[in-house]
Image: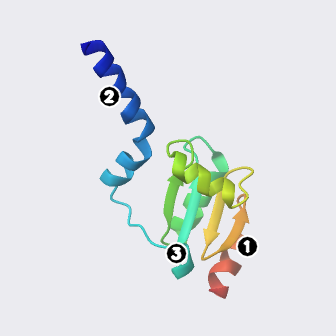
Amino acid sequence: MKKFIAIVFIVAVYQSWGDINRFFSDSPEYATAGGGIVLYATEWCGYCQKTREFFAENNIEYIEYDIEKSAERNREYKELGGRGVPLVNVAGTIIHGYDPRSIRAAIQSH
């Protein structure tokens, strides 16, 4: 019986990991329609790292979601037309891949 309860607990935690991670995350949540910038990325992606560096070099605030660690964020990424990473959402303007020129243009137009 103890093993069964342990297995049920582990499965429940696994299925809710995205919600648990967001609860303990210190990243603020805000809507992209309000002018926020969201980066959908993975840890291992070289172009994702270049995008992070671009944001840091230009003092651009953004929120990052790892699409491999959150089922909800992965679903959002797919709904936005995600085909590869990085995917950047600048207040509703979607940019596929590492494209500093497009990111700058999207920020300036919002």
Quickly name the residue at label 3.
Answer: 36
Classify mark 2: helix, strand or loop: helix
Q: Quadrant of the C terminus?
A: bottom right
**Image coords of residue 80 (percent x, y):** 68, 61
- Left or right, residue 61 beside residue 46: left
Disc 3 vs disc 1: which is toward the camera?
Answer: 3
Q: Which mark is residue 53?
A: none
State the residue lying farthest toward the bottom: 109
Given residues 73 and 99, the one toward you in this image is: 73
**Image coords of residue 11 (percent x, y):** 40, 28
Residue 52 position (above or below residue 74): below
Residue at 68% x, 79% y is 106
For the residue marked with disc 1, what is the amino acid?
A: Ser
Classify mark 1: helix, strand or loop: helix
For the residue marked with disc 3, what is the amino acid?
A: Gly
Q: Which mark is residue 9?
A: 2
Residue 8 position (above or below residue 54): above
Q: Residues within 10 Å of mark 1 (few under 14, many from 20)?
A: some
The figure's colour scheme reads: rainbow
- Left or right, residue 78 beside residue 40: right
Quickly name the residue at label 1.
Answer: 102
